[in-house]
Amino acid sequence: MLWSILKVIIFVAIAVCLAYGASYLLETPGEVRFAFGNYEVLLSPLGFVIALAVVLLAAFLLMKLIGLLVAIMRFLLGDETALSRYFARSRQRRGLDALTDAMNALASDDAKGAMKYSAKAERLLARPDLTQIMVARSAELGGDKVKARTYYKEMLANPRSRFAGVEGLMRQELAAGDTATALELAKKAFAIRPDSPSILRQLFDLQSQREDWSGARATLTAATQAKLLPRDVTVRRDAVLSLADARALIAKGDTGRGGEAALQANKLAPTLVPAAALASAVHVERGSKRKAVKALTTAWATNPHPDLAAAFAAIEPAETPAHRRKRFDTLIAAKPDDVESHLLKAELALADEDFPAARKAMGTVAETDPTTRSLAIMAAVERGTGAPDAVVSGWLTKALSASRGPQWTCEKCNHVHSQWMPICENCGAFDTLAWKPAAHAEDASLSQSAMLPLIIGVGDSPPEAELETVKPIRDPKDEAKVVDA
């Protein structure tokens, strides 16, 4: 409101000034005389002012006309002008629109559209750092791997697109199954951009699959520093890597460093079954049986497992079945109500030929959790108590078609493994094995799910043809080999 009033006041003031000026010029006597050669022009004061305004306007229009003619000449000669800038902006706008269309086509897996629009964007935009990656990805989506590879290599020359070029080449090598070359490319990409989450994950996976445990640990450290992983995941992966490194070192004969790595793995993840079993063997070798017992009972309290029982048996390999039953009370007491504890207690009683105690230990396990192992134990109990062959055969028949119980199963692809390993042998995933019932029946080894052979002492074994799955292994050397494995 105030501004409107102010504008009216200014307008009125200007009009008054102009009117006053015009009246003053009309009333002013005299004239303005222009003389040039033989020509003479006489103007009144008001006529002079009007003539001056017309001359200034004509001069302004003449300068604009001259500027336009110069611009046209420069345009024809190829120099940059406002007209050329207009066409350049139009070309850039159409190129960016084509680039956007190419991105949308890629997002919707439209290979034909992606190729069309990315080629158009490349033609309109003089920005290879923008268009090369789009053309390469579009060619890759359309199955033209040669063209994609060509563009990825061209991108290596530009510092701004070098990372994307290396990553694209790495992806192609992975698709071709050349993990060695892919690993080298992943290292180069990591050197260019060490905080890239996708490269850190890919580099870690490749190093793990190729059993480069020290390299994988360095990558894990980088991922931790970049705060890409939660602390509990970092600690767990570090433990698995330490365990894998320990196994590799022991296999090479470096028991000193291997033992330290095994103890480190157990320290980082006390409930990791294979780490506890290997740490127990290291403690026993170094004469620290008490530490071995502590490591195994700690793991058993969370994850009861036959491998832990085997390692516990290996602490005193030459003991009698009776002594073994008494010593195992410490381990079983860590989690007495678990199914594994009931099975273990029954197996110990069978080894001591105490068949009533074995039946009592089993309770209703064979009915509530009928697996090959629990049914085989019941067959052994019936055989030991003198039951008819038909009863024994009945249990064995059930065992043949029963579930094999928990096994080392990959949680990613459900592949069953005969023993724990850091990398799934089927899908290559890291630390995905869990001790659980398999989703599908597998012809895997029964060494983990059959009756635990390492805790059975001297005694009569059932006929091999009938109870092959519960045949005891009596040689303590065999026990040590399994624990070391």
Image (cartoon, rainbow, N blue to C red):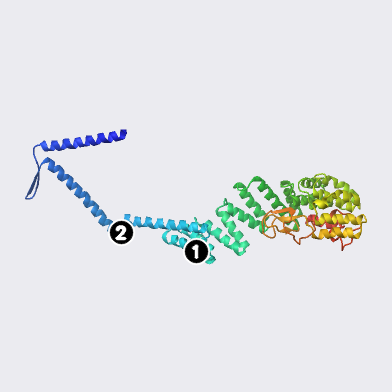
**Residue type at numbered disc 1:** Lys
Residue nearer the viewer, 166 or 357:
357
Quadrant holding the C terminus: bottom right
Residue 112, label in figure: 1
Q: Position of residue 328 (x, y in %)?
A: 85, 47
User: How many marks on residues?
Assistant: 2
Residue that appears at 8% across and 37% down: 29
Judging from the image, what secondary structure is the residue with disc 2 in? helix
Local packing at callout 1 (Cα closer than 10 Å; few below 14, some 14-19, many 20+) is: some
The residue carrying mark 2 is: 75
Q: Is residue 102 above or below residue 3?
A: below
Q: Residues within 10 Å of mark 2 (few under 14, many from 20)?
A: some
Q: Is residue 420 visible?
A: no
Q: Is residue 250 left or right of residue 182?
A: right
> Percent x, y for residue 446?
79, 59
Image quadrant in which the N terminus is located: top left
Residue that protrudes farthest toward the left in the picture: 38
Structural distance between the alpha carbons of marks 1 and 2:
38 Å
**Does dot 1 land on a helix, a strand or a loop?**
helix
Residue in the image at 20% along x and 37% along y:
15
Q: Are marks 1 and 2 in contact (CB under 8 Å)?
A: no
Q: Is residue 2 above or below residue 362?
A: above
Q: Amino acid at mark 2?
A: Phe
Left-right relation of 413 to 57: right
**Residue 70 appears anywhere in the view:** yes
Image x and y of residue 259, in percent:
76, 51
Please give left or right for residue 56 compared with residue 260 in the image.
left
